[in-house]
C-alpha cells in the first residue's frame, strides 16, 4: 500500500486565497473547507487508500516557548482561522483520519506519521503531500517522498539534493543558518542559500564544520567570515536548528490500517455537504465508497 499524508494547513491556506468567498446560512465562511474536502476526495477517487491529514488546530506550539519571535496566528485572517475546526470535523465525517495539533505543529504530525508508516513492511511508499521545504527533511530515498500536488512534482532524496544542494537530513541545519521568514527566525549574518548549501554539502551537520576556517573545503568562499558568524552565534544556530527540526514522537496512529479510508459517515457528512451547498461531494464520496 501507499500512504498519503496531507498538509491540511497548507491546503486550507491555499484554497482560502484561491477560491471565491462563500458563507453558510449562519454567515460563516466555508469556501476553503469545501475546496479542501473536494481536493482530498479527488485523491481517494484516484486510488489513494490510506490517508491522514494534519492541521494546525492552534497555530502556536511548543516552539513559541523556545523562541518568542516564532510565528503566531497574528495577522492571519479570522475568516481563515475560523475554518480550521470546521475542516477537521468535516474531514472526519468524510471518513478521513485527522490530526488537529495543539502543542505541536501539523508538520510534526506529518513527520511522525511518515516515520512510523515507513517502518511498516506492508507500506510501499509514503507520500507527504505538501511543497513545504521543512518537510524535505523527512525524505528517505524513494521510500518517503514529497509530493507537490498542485505542480505535480514528486521529490525523492535525489530530488531534494537537486533542489537544495544538500541531503534531507541537513535541511534543519540549512534553515538554521539561512533563516526561515515563514517561521519567524532570522538565521545567521552573512549566511546565504549558496554558502549554506556548499558548506553543508561537505559537512552534514553544523557540528561537522571545522572551527578553524582554514580547514574548510576550498569550494566554500568567504570561509573566514562565515566561520566567525557561525561560531560567535553558535547558541543561536543550535536554537534555530531545534526550531527547524520536526518531531517524530507525535501520537498519530497505532497501525497503518487505521489510515484506511472506507466510507463517509453518511448522516453527518450529508449535513456538512448541505451546509457548504455542495451536494455533489456527498454523491462523489458515496460513489467511490461503493467501489471499495
Image (cartoon, rainbow, N blue to C red):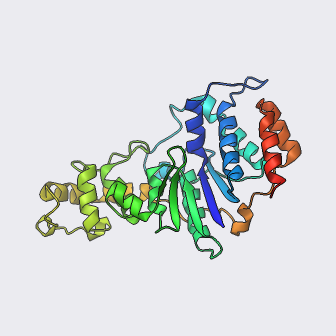
Residue 57 position in % (x across, y down): 63, 45
Is residue 46 shown left or right of residue 168?
A: right
Q: Residue furthest left?
A: 214
**In terms of depth relative to the viewer, which is nearer, 191 or 3?**
3
- Total label count? 0
Q: In front: 114, or 62?
A: 114
Residue farthest to the right, as pictured: 267
Quarter of the picture containing the C terminus is: bottom right
Seen in the image, is 203 located left or right of residue 222?
A: right
Q: Position of residue 155 (x, y in %)?
A: 46, 57
Above or below: residue 35 compared with residue 162: above
Q: Is residue 49 above or below residue 271?
A: below
The residue that appears at 71% across and 59% down in the rendered structure is 49
Q: Is 183 displayed left or right of 217 in the figure?
A: right
Residue displayed at 25% across by 67% down: 202
Rendered-image quadrant of the N terminus: bottom right
Q: Does residue 105 show up?
A: no
Does the image show residue 56? yes
Q: Position of residue 54 (x, y in %)?
A: 62, 52
For the point 77% across and 33% down, the residue is 278
When the figure is inspected, residue 20 is found, relative to residue 57, above or below; the finding is: above
Pinpoint residue 215: horizontal percent, then vertical percent.
Answer: 13, 70
- Say if 109 sits above or below 88 in the image: below
Q: Residue at x 76, y 31 (%)?
A: 276
Quarter of the rendering containing residue 39: top right
Q: Is residue 92 left or right of residue 10?
A: right
Amino acid at each position: 500500500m501507499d500512504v498519503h499524508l496531507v498538509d491540511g494547513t497548507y491546503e486550507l491556506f491555499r484554497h482560502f486565497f484561491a477560491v471565491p468567498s462563500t458563507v453558510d446560512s449562519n454567515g460563516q465562511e466555508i469556501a476553503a473547507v469545501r475546496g479542501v474536502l473536494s481536493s482530498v476526495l479527488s485523491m481517494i477517487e484516484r486510488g489513494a487508500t490510506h490517508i491522514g491529514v494534519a492541521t494546525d488546530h492552534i497555530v502556536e506550539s511548543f516552539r513559541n516557548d523556545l523562541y518568542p519571535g516564532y510565528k503566531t496566528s497574528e495577522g492571519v485572517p479570522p475568516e481563515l482561522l475560523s475554518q480550521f475546526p470546521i475542516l477537521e470535523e468535516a474531514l472526519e465525517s468524510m471518513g478521513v483520519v485527522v490530526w488537529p495539533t495543539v502543542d505541536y505543529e501539523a508538520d510534526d504530525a506529518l513527520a511522525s506519521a511518515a516515520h512510523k508508516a515507513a517502518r511498516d513492511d506492508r507500506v510501499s511508499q509514503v507520500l507527504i503531500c505538501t511543497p513545504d521545504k521543512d518537510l524535505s527533511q523527512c525524505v528517505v530515498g524513494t521510500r518517503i517522498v514529497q509530493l507537490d500536488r498542485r505542480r505535480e512534482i514528486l521529490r525523492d532524496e535525489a530530488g531534494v539534493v537537486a533542489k537544495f544542494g544538500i541531503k534531507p537530513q541537513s535541511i534543519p541545519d540549512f534553515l538554521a543558518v539561512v533563516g526561515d521568514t515563514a517561521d519567524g527566525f532570522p538565521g545567521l549574518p552573512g549566511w546565504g542559500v549558496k554558502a549554506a548549501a556548499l558548506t553543508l554539502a561537505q559537512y552534514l551537520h553544523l557540528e561537522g564544520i571545522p572551527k578553524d576556517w582554514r580547514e574548510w573545503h576550498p569550494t566554500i568562499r568567504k570561509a573566514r567570515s562565515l566561520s566567525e558568524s557561525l561560531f560567535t552565534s553558535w547558541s543561536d544556530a543550535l536554537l534555530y536548528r531545534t526550531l527547524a527540526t520536526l518531531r517524530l514522537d507525535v501520537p498519530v496512529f497505532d497501525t497503518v490500517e487505521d489510515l484506511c479510508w472506507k466510507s463517509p459517515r453518511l448522516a453527518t457528512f450529508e449535513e456538512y455537504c448541505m451546509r457548504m451547498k455542495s451536494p455533489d461531494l456527498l454523491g462523489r464520496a458515496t460513489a467511490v465508497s461503493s467501489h471499495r
